[in-house]
Amino acid sequence: MAAASARQVNIAIIGAGGVGKCFLSQLEQLAARRPSPKVVLTYICTSKKAIYSTDHVAIPLNTVSSTLASSQQAPLALPKLVDFLGTSGSKTVLVDNTSSQDVADAYPLFLSRGISIVTPNKKAFSGSYKLWQDIFGAAEQSGAKVYHESSVGAGLPVISTLKDLVDTGDEVTKVEGVFSGTMSFLFNSFAPTSGSGGKWSAEVKKAKELGYTEPDPRDDLNGLDVARKLTILARLAGLPVESPAAFPVQSLIPKELESVASGDEFLEKLPAFDAQMEETKAAAEKEGKVVRFVGSIDVATKQVKVGLEKFDLSHPIAALKGSDNIISFYTKRYGSNPLIIQGAGAGGEVTAMGVTSDLLKVLSQIA
Amino acid sequence: MAAASARQVNIAIIGAGGVGKCFLSQLEQLAARRPSPKVVLTYICTSKKAIYSTDHVAIPLNTVSSTLASSQQAPLALPKLVDFLGTSGSKTVLVDNTSSQDVADAYPLFLSRGISIVTPNKKAFSGSYKLWQDIFGAAEQSGAKVYHESSVGAGLPVISTLKDLVDTGDEVTKVEGVFSGTMSFLFNSFAPTSGSGGKWSAEVKKAKELGYTEPDPRDDLNGLDVARKLTILARLAGLPVESPAAFPVQSLIPKELESVASGDEFLEKLPAFDAQMEETKAAAEKEGKVVRFVGSIDVATKQVKVGLEKFDLSHPIAALKGSDNIISFYTKRYGSNPLIIQGAGAGGEVTAMGVTSDLLKVLSQIA
């Protein structure tokens, strides 16, 4: 395949944190395993540092982390980065491994210049509906690709499955699931299907100690992360949801603790509100059910909501383990038994896997 | 998008049975919804009849079923079909909606001529390992694509997920699941997680009456269908399994009934063997478990097997409903909690959905 081996695709990466590091390692393996198309890293940056050269020289993948740490170059401003990548003469894929709204806002610009994008960044697809339209409009115009599997459920095939259902003409009637690893862990411990579980505040504290929550647990308990994911899925299912603020999202932060200064102070004061959650749990138990924090999209009635719901013990959502996500697609073709996808929905390696597999899909189309 | 709308891809279809009819209807919708690339049906045949013209004129999709029924043309022999499609001057995708070994054996020939293939036909990928190598070798050489999502689990994203795991460098350690809708239905009724279930022979009879079995239920009970699917997945996971006969497959046909003349006679005589299955069920119950017909692949020990296994009541395999399939991927990245895919694994519409979504993937790459 002499002709094929000449193909080359440039890669630019923004972000080298948890997901970014895992992605770099997967990219290095990929480049070693697959000679064609040749992937060449020509730009990488964190918020402070960058590596690139004006003549787009390949950055060696095996030493990139240490080179980046000692680099004296500053990142290019986004419009300059667009120009830099757009004038390389090679097909280019931007890998955005940040959760930055600024980078997301620049997607239409990158795409309009023919630069494809793969990313786990939720902000681009759950911001304003106008940004969503601008992104996919720019991609349609230029033929550049944009893939974001890891924006929901990390590496789980959630976005691709929903797209396949819609693109092949199925009618998605309802999407329902547990979309947060943190919430999954909390409720599987607080209200297990067998045994009694711990006190709510104790479970939140434990989850934080185990690294399952954000530094301030309120960033998980406010439900916004789940609302962002639901916004993305609802739009893919055909509902033009304006933003994550456009539908009811139940916050598990007691009103009185919304404005306390720190996550630590929040955790200190949370036990005073245990009775409230205990009551919710007991009400479910009375019906032989357990309580779970779920998101759902009812396509026919256009209702999207995020919050607590009760489930029979035998329901797959009740039976979830650890910090797993579960997503059920109810469709016309699949009838009363949904298509279900389940597994780890967070973590550096599995999130990076979604990004890498998106990159492979883009390469197969543009190279 | 003037340039893009000029792109055209020819489609040739073999088979217009259950899956084939559903696919035709999905293709018609697809062509109406997506102007680019333009998909043009230039050949379609059943085992007896065909429609095509030597100058590759488009066959109208809305009337193809009735035109085919009244057609006086005979199908082209496979080598002639290869020539016919290979000389059209347009990119071409062959959709094989049969379960024919003859058609499968001709895949390397189609592929070597640059004709891409999408198909639910298990025979091509679960036959001899040599045929597997010839198929993917021919595709690699010519650049033609070959997709077969529906060969395992119908439209469920099983093949694509396993490929993504492998292609992104994850290490698949084990694959386990219920791969047959018939077996799923039988055991969910015979050994339910709550209640006592019916007699084995009565459940088989009921399954046949409901259309869940092949005309002769022995074609399901011999386990070969599951063995074929396991062969495909094992090969994708990196094991060069020689054929479905290369590993242990438990048949649920009593030896004495293997050679009775008909499915009806088999069903008549089956009750005499109920005690055997009852014993298996009771042994599982004694351990607080239920029995299920599963397939598993242990990649490290290279063990593939198909047959009865016992599962805790809380295990997702035990909790399966109706005739659903469930497939669990255990990998290095996903750790102790597997990535699970669950839902209907048979039926015309969902099988055709897998074929249609494969076609979309091929179109995105070749058009």
Image (cartoon, coloured by chain):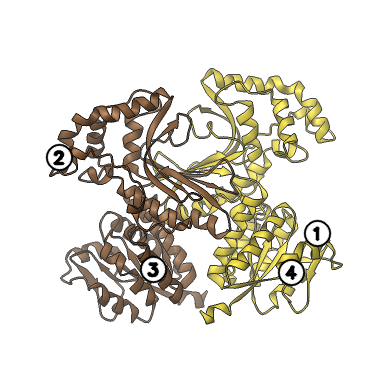
Chain colours: A yellow, B brown
Q: Which residue is mark 1?
A: A47
Q: What kind of element bears circle 2?
A: helix
Q: In terms of depth relative to the viewer, which is nearer, A281 or B309? A: B309
Q: Is residue B254 above or below residue B55?
A: above
Left or right of residue B163: residue B59: left
Name the kind of residue labelled 1 in the image: Ser
To the question of a shared chain for discs 2 and 1, the answer is no
Chain of residue at mark 3: B
- Spatial CA distance of label 4 from label 2 is 69 Å
Image quadrant where residue A292 sits: top right
Q: Position of residue B181 (x, y in %)?
A: 34, 43
- Spatial CA distance of label 3 from label 4 is 38 Å
Q: Earlier in the sequence, mark 2 or mark 3?
A: 3
Left or right of residue A314: residue A134: right
Q: Which mark is residue B264?
A: 2
Q: In terms of depth relative to the viewer, which is nearer, A317 or B237? A: B237
Image quadrant where residue B322 sits: top left
Name the kind of residue labelled 3 in the image: Ile
Q: Which residue is mark 3?
A: B135
Left or right of residue A317: residue B177: left
